[in-house]
Image: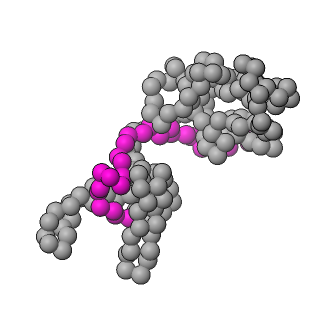
């Protein structure tokens, strides 16, 4: 998460620099502003709002900030500390640009548009006419990898940064 003020906040899957990360306090200020706007019925610019509940950034995700990794907790209505970032690893992901349906023997697999998978590998295979085609081995978290043909119109390959978290830090807090 990046930005020094609530109206500048943005998130990205690529690391621009750890010194430039947003502070968790900016995210908390965003929540305070949302709560005040709900009470008043209009935002800080004077525009009427119809919202009746707050909308936290990354509600179902982990957010990397200057102070560490945080997760939204609805019970306390605040960002809860999850752990420190111990490093970053760059990986490639495959994002579905269109719905992809495939049959593997008796198994039917449906990949939804907009979903992303970790790129586990690439290799060349040959079709029935002995023509080479690029295959992508993709993997969802906790699943067995599957291979799909690479088609630029159906999939996009991009690079993202994954934060490395030490789970021992979390146990020490609890």
Residue at (30%, 51%) from the top-left corner? 152
Q: Quadrant of residue 28?
A: top right
Total of numbered circles in the picture?
0
Tell me the magenta residue range: 146-174
Residue placed most toward the observer, 45 or 84: 45
**Is residue 32 a member of the stretch shown in magenta?**
no
Residue at (67%, 42%) from the top-left corner? 59
Residue placed most toward the observer, 12 or 170: 12
Expressed as whole percent of the image width and height from the top left, the position of residue 102 reads 39, 70
Residue at (45%, 30%) from the top-left corner? 15
Residue 22 seen in this snapshot: no
Residue 3 seen in this snapshot: yes
Q: Is residue 71 left or right of residue 64?
A: right
Q: Furthest residue to the right?
A: 39
Q: Is residue 146 left or right of residue 12?
A: left
Q: Quadrant of the N terminus?
A: top right
Expressed as whole percent of the image width and height from the top left, the position of residue 73 reads 74, 42
Compared with 75, 65 (above or below) is: above
Colour scheme of the picture? one colour
Q: Quadrant of the C terminus?
A: top right
Expressed as whole percent of the image width and height from the top left, the position of residue 78 reads 76, 35
Expressed as whole percent of the image width and height from the top left, the position of residue 71 reads 67, 40
Q: Furthest residue to the bottom?
A: 106
Q: Quadrant of residue 70?
A: top right
Residue at (21%, 61%) from the top-left corner? 133
Compared with 152, 45 (above or below) is: above
Compared with 11, 146 (above or below) is: below
**Is residue 161 a member of the stretch shown in magenta?**
yes
Q: Furthest residue to the left?
A: 130
Residue placed most toward the observer, 97 or 145: 97
């Amino acid at each position: 998460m990046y930005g020094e003020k609530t109206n500048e906040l943005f998130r990205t899957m690529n690391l621009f620099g750890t010194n430039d990360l947003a502070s968790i306090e900016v995210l908390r200020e965003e929540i305070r502003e949302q709560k005040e706007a709900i009470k008043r019925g209009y935002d800080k610019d004077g525009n009427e709002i119809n919202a009746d509940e707050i909308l936290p950034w990354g509600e179902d995700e982990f957010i990397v900030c200057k102070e560490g990794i945080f997760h939204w907790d609805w019970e306390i209505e605040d960002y809860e500390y999850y752990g420190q970032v111990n490093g970053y690893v760059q990986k490639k992901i495959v994002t579905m640009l269109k719905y992809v349906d495939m049959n593997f023997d008796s198994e039917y697999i449906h990949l939804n548009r907009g979903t992303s998978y970790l790129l586990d590998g690439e290799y060349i295979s040959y079709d029935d006419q002995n023509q080479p085609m690029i295959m992508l081995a993709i993997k969802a978290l906790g699943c067995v990898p599957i291979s799909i043909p690479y088609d630029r119109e159906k999939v996009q390959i991009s690079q993202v940064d994954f934060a490395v978290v030490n789970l021992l830090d979390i146990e020490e807090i609890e």
